[in-house]
Structures are given as C-alpha cells and as structure tokens.
Image (spheres, rainbow, N blue to C red):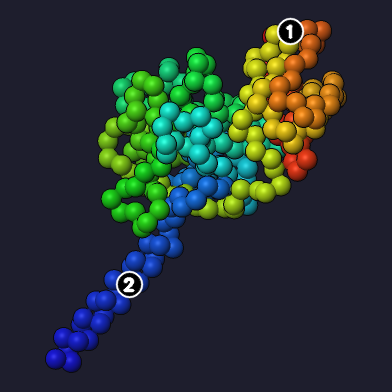
Amino acid sequence: MKKITFKMTSFLFLTFMTLQVQAQVYEEWTQNGWYTIGVPGEDLFMTINASGDLEWAAKLPGDDEKQVWAIVDHVSPASTGYMQITATIAGEGNYTMGTIPANISGKNTTLTVRLGDPISDNTAENYGYDQFQRRKSATNNGGNDALFIKTPSEGGSRYGVAPSAAGDPVQFDGGGIDKLEFKFVSALSTNEFDSASIIVTNPVNNQLIINGLPTTVKQISVYSLLGSEILTKKVEGQVSFSTDVSTLPSGVYVVEIIGISGKHTVKVIKQ
C-alpha cells in the first residue's frame, strides 16, 4: 500500500510540475492590452521590419515597439468578437496588421502591416482585411492561444504555418489550429484618449479631412517627416476637421491629433 501511495503521489507531483512548466512557457490572450506574439518554444516573434512589412524575427532587446502589439476590440466589427492588432512606432505612427487581396489564395493568407489605423468605414474598398478573432487551440489553459483572420473572401484562415527561420513571412492557412504565444506586456495606457473613432482621409488630395474626433481633441498639427511644422489648427469641440493643403508638395506627412490627455499620430500621403 505504501508503494502504491508513493507512486501515485509521485505521479501527481510530476503532472503538477508539468502543468506548471507549461503555464510558465506558454502565455495566452486574456484581456485587451499590449502583447508580443510569438511561436511557442521558439525565439521568433511577429515583427515590423525595416521595410515596414511583417515578418518573424528574433526577440529584440526590451519590449521593442516593433514587436509589441495592441490587441483590442475592432473599431467597426462585422460581428462581435472581432479584434484589431496595431503597433505604434515613435516618429512613424500607427501600423495595422492585416492582409491584402493579393496575399490571399483560398485559405492560404500572408499577413502584412500598413501605416494607418484599422478601417472602420464598411464602405471603404479595403474594409474587412484587418479583422481578427482570438481562438482557442486544443491545449489552451483558459485564455486564447490561436488566431484567425476574417477577410471578406475567406473567413477561416488561421495561424498554422510554422516559420523555419527569422525573416520568414507570417502565413496563415486552413490546417490545424496551431498555438501562438501571446505574452502580456502591459495594460492599455490611461494617458491616451480613445482614437478608435478617428477617420483620416488617406491619401490626401487638396483637402485634409478628419472625421470622428473625440470632444477632448484640442489641436491638429501637420509636420514634415523631418519634424518641421507645416500647420496647426485649434479644433476644440469639433467632431470634424477640414483644411486646404493643395499648396503642399506631394509626399508623406505626419498628422498629430492632440487631446487633453494624450496624442494620436498618423502618417498621410499627399498626392
């Protein structure tokens, strides 16, 4: 009896330790916030590369903003449960993860990123290509450890193509629901105002138009990529903003939307 008890105790102890190790190694999405997204057991993370595209890369020092993603409810979901995945890089602006029609072949989808915020206008040509769903794999521990992309042409593509090396593209397919590691970095900042409703025309022709401004926005400024101020306008209490930029040379500009408790930057292309 003592031997049986000892064996059973040892078995339970080893099982408990195994579960503890798994809990320490694999992290999952549990709440809106900032995360790194990696391959379990591998030093590979979804990363914005130097060309402004998405790839798998080794962990960068610290919580590098090229590898830290805000995962929150989508600004204008087609149904409940849709999420948006964005990154903010100082001096560049906001990047949105998603795909484009050219990157979709059935359920085989290559993800990319683009400068700008998620698309909230369901009449826009590229609406619906930046909407994700967090899902559970068969080995989840209570959170969400898998990821689907929901596009207009194919709604069942999910992470399932394991990268072989740094530099590989991020690819989804219709195979098994493979596990991702969502490592929680921090909660959403309370020092930033809600920019989800803001829609900035991009590219810009003769008029810079911004709709959906929160009432806490006080000022809008436009800068060159070198940081030179082009214009600044007070917009307190306005929900829409429009200004003539027809005299500006073609190129890329940074629009800075300043609120009471923070600011939101967007890069725009002037045609």
Q: Amino acid at mark 2?
A: Phe
Is residue 13 positioned above or below 21 on the image? Answer: below
Question: Badge 1 is on which residue?
Answer: 206
Q: Amino acid at mark 1?
A: Asn
Instruction: Using the image as rendered, state which of residue 250 and residue 144 is in the foreground.
Output: 144
Q: Residue at x 63, y 42 (%)?
A: 65
Question: Badge 2 is on which residue?
Answer: 16
Question: Farthest residue toward the front?
Answer: 237
Give whichever of discs 1 and 2 has the lower sequence position.
2
Is residue 15 positioned above or below 104 on the image? Answer: below
Lateral position of residue 37 relative to residue 221, left or right: left
**SS of the residue under disc 2:** helix
Count of numbered circles on the image: 2
Quarter of the image holding residue 209? top right
The image position of residue 92, as x and y in percent, is: 69, 31
Is residue 100 positioned above or below 131 on the image? Answer: above
Lateral position of residue 235 relative to residue 16, left or right: right
**SS of the residue under disc 1:** loop
The local crowd at label 1, few if under 14, some if 14 to 19, many if 20 or more residues have their Cα within 10 Å, is few
The image position of residue 225, as x and y in percent, is: 77, 24
Q: Residue at x 26, y 76 (%)?
A: 12
